[in-house]
């Protein structure tokens, strides 16, 4: 019996030692997994390193979108400390003319194990279209079930009505909202040119140049449009104008010298070429004074109440600048025409809508028009 008791004691001692070793090993492993007992989140112990983790479906960051056109809708976003929304730049949808933006929800905290959300859309204030389904005007499409990313698509204008998008976390029921309104920004700028005749000018690379006849005043309406053919009711355009002269002119200066009795002693001429918008300079004998400017003396262009006001003053061929005559010398600049017959000077007018940055140009050339008539025989007698 004593021998059996000793054997039992040895077995118990070995079992206790083995258990102690296992406990020590477990503590060491736990210390390693919790970064020295500083991270007690059991959900993250067996996660892959950040660089190896795959992003769950629906949490992919929204791809960068082109920004060549402004979005047709605007959003006023209301967030909470638990969930926040952010709207991306505009993108063009594939089917028909629609415009879309990407709405992304950020759920806090970052280490929340379940960030699933649900989306909803409804009229907020809709006195105009409130009896219609909201999805006839704006649709909301999550990337997947529970995804934090949704595509908001405008199908057609909804005037001054507003729409509410709500994002709700499945855990805790926290919400963030975005109020959507139709901004209807223009994406195209044009001119109503029915009062002028446009002609293709092959000398200038096939551009269309509109002819403005002397003696007339032209008011050219500036037009704005977008794919929905509906500019937002609250959008007020603001314009700037830039006018540039194109081409060169040539002309002839004629200098005539007289004697004291008024007889002509000599007469010389000189052909000159310069830019359409350069000043015409008088003879050196008179201090090289400025006689005029062909560009400024042929046309006037300005903005007036959303229209281009174009006033042709004189055709190029009608210009003539004269120096002051003295008792012995008279200098005249005359015979104005295009320096290159294939590139008749014209004026390029660029109008820009400053809020959107869209712009358009129009080319205008002043031409002569009928201003008198006479007959070779004032009277006929038979």
Image (spheres, helix red, strand yellow):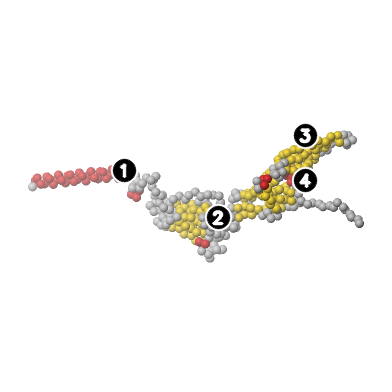
Dot 2 crowding, Cα within 10 Å, few <14, some 14–19, many 20+ = many
Q: Nearer the viewer, mark 2 or mark 3?
A: 3
Q: Upstream in the sequence, badge 2 or badge 1?
A: 1
Q: Upstream in the sequence, badge 4 or badge 3?
A: 3
| Callout 3: SS | helix
Residue at 63% across, 50% down:
360
Q: Which of marks 4 and 1 is in front?
A: 4
- Cα–Cα gap, marks 2 and 3: 61 Å
- Cα–Cα gap, marks 2 and 1: 54 Å
Q: Upstream in the sequence, badge 2 or badge 3?
A: 2
Q: Nearer the viewer, mark 3 or mark 1?
A: 3
| Callout 1: SS | helix
| Depth order, front residue of 119/365 | 365
In the rendered structure, are the residues bearing label 2 and label 3 in contact, judged by CB atoms less than 8 Å apart?
no
- On residue 284, the disc is 3
- Cα–Cα gap, marks 3 and 1: 95 Å
The residue beneath circle 4 is 318
């Amino acid at each position: 019996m004593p021998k059996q008791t000793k054997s039992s004691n040895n077995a118990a001692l070995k079992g206790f030692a083995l258990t102690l070793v296992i406990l020590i090993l477990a503590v060491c492993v736990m210390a390693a997994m919790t970064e020295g007992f500083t991270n007690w989140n059991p959900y993250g112990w067996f996660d892959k390193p950040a660089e190896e983790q795959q992003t769950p479906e629906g949490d992919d960051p929204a791809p960068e979108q082109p920004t060549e056109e402004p979005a047709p809708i605007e959003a006023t976003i209301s967030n909470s400390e638990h969930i926040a929304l952010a709207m991306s730049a505009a993108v063009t949808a594939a089917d028909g003319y629609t415009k879309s933006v990407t709405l992304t929800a950020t759920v806090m905290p970052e280490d929340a194990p379940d960030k699933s959300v649900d989306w909803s859309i409804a009229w907020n204030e809709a006195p105009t279209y409130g009896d219609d389904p909201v999805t006839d005007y704006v649709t909301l499409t999550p990337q997947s079930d529970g995804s934090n990313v949704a595509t908001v698509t405008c199908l057609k204008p909804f005037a001054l009505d507003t729409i509410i998008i709500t994002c709700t976390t499945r855990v805790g029921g926290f919400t963030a909202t975005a109020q959507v309104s139709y901004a209807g920004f223009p994406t195209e700028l044009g001119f109503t040119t029915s009062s002028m005749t446009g002609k293709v000018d092959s000398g200038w690379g096939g551009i269309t140049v509109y002819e403005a006849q002397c003696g007339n005043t032209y008011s050219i309406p500036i037009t704005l449009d977008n794919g929905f053919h509906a500019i937002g009711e609250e959008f007020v355009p603001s314009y700037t104008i830039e006018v540039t002269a194109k081409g060169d002119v040539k002309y002839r200066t004629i200098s005539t010298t007289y004697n004291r009795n008024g007889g002509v002693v000599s007469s010389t001429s000189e052909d000159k070429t310069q830019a359409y918008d350069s000043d015409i300079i008088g003879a050196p004998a008179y201090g090289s004074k400025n006689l005029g400017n062909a560009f400024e003396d042929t046309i006037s262009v300005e903005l007036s109440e959303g229209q281009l006001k174009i006033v042709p003053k004189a055709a190029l061929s009608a210009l003539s600048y004269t120096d002051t005559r003295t008792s012995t010398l008279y200098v005249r600049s005359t015979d104005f025409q295009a320096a290159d017959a294939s590139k008749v000077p014209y004026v390029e007018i660029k109008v820009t809508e400053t809020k959107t940055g869209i712009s358009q140009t129009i080319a205008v050339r002043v031409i002569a028009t009928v201003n008198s008539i006479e007959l070779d025989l004032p009277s006929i007698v038979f």
